[in-house]
Amino acid sequence: MLSQTIANQRLFNQRITGMKHETPEEVVRGLGAVQAQDYHQAVWGIGLRTQSAKLSDVEQAMIDRKIVLTWPMRGTIFFVPAEDAKWMVKLTESRFQTHDKKKQAELELDEGTLHRCSTIIGNALSGCSPVSRPKLMDLLEDAGINTKDGRGYYILGYLGRTGMICFGPHEGKQQSFVLLDEWVPESRELTLEESLAELALRYFTGHGPATIQDFAWWVGLTLTDAKRGFEAVKSDLRLDLVNAIEYWSSVTAPDVSADTDSVVLLPGFDEYYLGYKDRSAIIETEHDAKIAPHRNGVFQPMMVAGGEVVGVWKRETKRSGIEITLSPFSQRKDREEEFMEAAKQYSDFVGMPMTRIEWNQAL
């Protein structure tokens, strides 16, 4: 296996190429979880892995409580299968205690204040009624709790990471929140060992070939805990040794049979990039910093050809339709038509016409 082979196998196992999933919930379950720091990017990450899903289909899966947005890993937002949200949050909750204490001191949020926030928000959401973020902030402010300077955002994240709340369906352009126990009343209950094993198997099945270090980074676990999960499912995995590095995949994963020279437009924060600690198999080191050029944790949407990240792109939504700008790392005259077709697939997904597509000079 060469790096390109690793990249193409990952594309195939993630269902970016080859056989697609039928539904949004199958995508999320197949990957274990889908990073969703940017909602509008994340829904496209799910859509491109399905046979024909549109934006409305992904959002309907949220409304139907088949997938939910919450904070299960690394203190950030993911789409997860609804029935798995609670045990995933519980698995990593303790990992943030030290960070939370420091952040709470910085924001001057003591235990008493956080308890009041929990009570106010819990009462507002009781009865499985989604409430928008601005309304929740108003409720806290009315109670004399300052939500400015990141305090409000932290409070919601803290309550999400402790398993109290999760995101509900969008209310127009606004995010809403619900009580997790009410929104998903039939949650699976797993022990710690079962949780580690379940997540390990899903990760290596949906992300392989990958290393144990990749898995530990993705979940936000210690390497020791990651190895516990890995060892529990090792018999279900196959090993590929590349340059003395162990890469693991599901034993049931078929060899790549799809077009290995495919062209796709991936969203920012996509699992194909952020699902691994080591990304050297899919992007040249000299270009890696261009994916998050401002070093603020914001990762740009990516142009991919033959498994390699070869540029970035952005979209601008206007009343008349979608405008897309492609910025390759080097000139891609030979792939222009394919990238334009990939852009058309994105506009079809969001249900808006593509009114302009522009190529920038090589970055």
Image (cartoon, grey):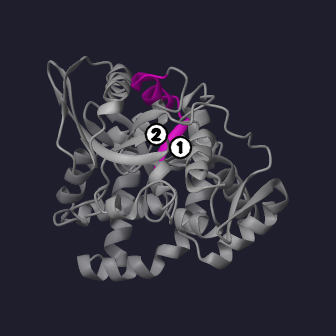
Left or right: where 260 falls relative to 248: left
In space, the residues marked 2 and 1 are separated at their CA atoms by 7 Å
Q: Is residue 19 above or below residue 28?
A: above
* Residue 141 picture location, percent across and down: 18, 58
Which label number is shown at residue 182?
Answer: 1
Residue 13 falls in which quadrant of the image?
top right
Q: Position of residue 65 (x, y in %)?
A: 53, 34
**The N terminus - image quarter:** bottom right
Which element is circle 2 on?
loop
Q: Residue 231 colored magenta?
A: no
Q: In the image shown, does 135 or 219 lie closer to the viewer?
A: 219
> Which of labels 2 and 1 is toward the front?
1
- Residue where numbered disc 2 is placed: 127
Q: How many marks?
A: 2
Q: Which residues are magenta?
A: 53-70
**Toward the viewer: 251 or 176?**
251
On residue 295, the disc is none
Q: Contact, CB < 8 Å: mark 2 with mark 1?
A: yes
Say whether residue 61 is magenta: yes
Alpha-carbon neighbours of circle 1 within 10 Å: few (<14), some, or many (≥20)? some
Q: Residue at x 49, y 64 (%)?
A: 162
Q: Quadrant of residue 203?
A: bottom right
Please state which amino acid type lies under the numbered disc 2: Gly
Q: Earlier in the sequence, mark 2 or mark 1?
A: 2
- Image x and y of residue 304, in percent: 41, 42
| Left or right: residue 180 compared with residue 347 | right
143 relative to 278 in the view: left or right: left
| Residue 82 visible to the viewer | no
Q: Position of residue 122 (x, y in %)?
A: 41, 53
Q: Amino acid at mark 1?
A: Glu
